[in-house]
Amino acid sequence: MKKYLLPLLLLTLSLLVTACGNSGDASEPEQKGEIDIYTHNDSEEMQDFVKGLADETGIEANVLRTSSGEGWSRMQSEAPDFGADMQWGMLHSIALKAEKEDYLEPYDSPTWEDIPDEFKDEDGKWYGWSYWFNLLGVNTGILEEKGLDKPESWEDLLDPQYKGEIVLPDPGTSGTAYLFISTIMQIMGEDEGWDYLEKLDENVGQYVKSGDAPAQMVAQGEYAIGITWDQAVYNRIDEGYPLEAIIPEDGVGYDLDVIWMFQGTENRELVEEVIDYVGSDEGMENSAEHRSMVTKTGIEGTEENIEDYLIDYDAVWAEENRDRIMKEWRENF
């Protein structure tokens, strides 16, 4: 397997775990080795995730973060000689595509036995550890300054008062954006959905590369409204930015965040231990510090009562129609 990670893109998380015999601290695990991981997760949360991994297992991780679309393109170009041992954080719909392409190595993890079947592949080729959803991040200061109403629904975003005030990701590179588009299609139907997106385009000030970027740009006062994902907004609210999270009343789509092992990894035993850790109580509790919902029963995420807003999102439909919808998106926008 190729062992390379592009320097300009590489987020190297230096988690040097001192061996127990050297430190004298019996609580620290012995350093076992390191693996290479691809992710679409936010850099800050991923840093915490792999620190928890190192603290529990002694495994160090080199992490390359890309947007979901970029990550899928990378996989296609590298197959079957992948540049990472595993994926920790990716769309469920892309996991289904990767499974069809035979990119994934099955593994039956014991720590995932008590997690509901709908959150994992029956052959152990992928595991869903959390799920996330689209929402709106609004800058309350800009709304007040410009006399703009607070949007409460997807439909509200078509109001001409928001012309040039909306930022959202490009679905060609962002899984967050594709979740939004497929959600609109599933709520409204395709014909009405495309009509909606054309009208929304008139109010969009900018399409950006990643799903996290709209939250940051709205937090910094560049735009009034960002279409993004839940924790991108909640994290910045916690940091003190003048943001408010709005879950559109007409419903939001959600997607599993999944992990898997790549075919051909030379570090299978280490990857198996990582998958076991993510499915353990300790791994899920660490994830729940950053995510609204995790898949292990009895462990609460950062937000409550989210289920009332979730539509019956069809990830299989989203995967099967992704290429067609993206082709039409590129032609229209």
Image (cartoon, helix red, strand yellow):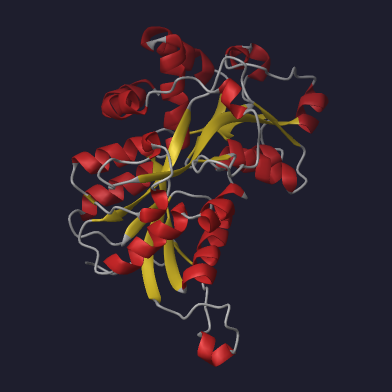
Q: State the residue at coordinates (37%, 20%).
A: 332
Q: Is residue 87 above or below residue 214?
A: below
Figure quadrant of residue 114:
top left
Residue in front for this viewpoint, 31 or 85: 31
Q: State the residue at coordinates (34%, 63%).
A: 271
Is residue 172 visible in the rendered image? The answer is no
Q: Residue furthest top?
A: 192
The image position of residue 293, as x and y in percent, is 56, 39
The image position of residue 273, as x and y in percent, is 38, 64
In the displayed structure image, the side of residue 56 where residue 191 appears, left or right: left
Where, quadrant-wise, is the C terminus in this rendering? Answer: top left
Q: State the residue at coordinates (58%, 13%).
A: 158
Residue in front for this viewpoint, 252 or 174: 252
Q: Is residue 163 above or below residue 209?
A: above
Q: Is residue 3 above or below residue 145?
A: below
Where, quadrant-wise, is the N terminus in this rendering? Answer: bottom left
In the displayed structure image, the side of residue 117 where residue 224 appears, left or right: right
Q: State the residue at coordinates (82%, 25%).
A: 144
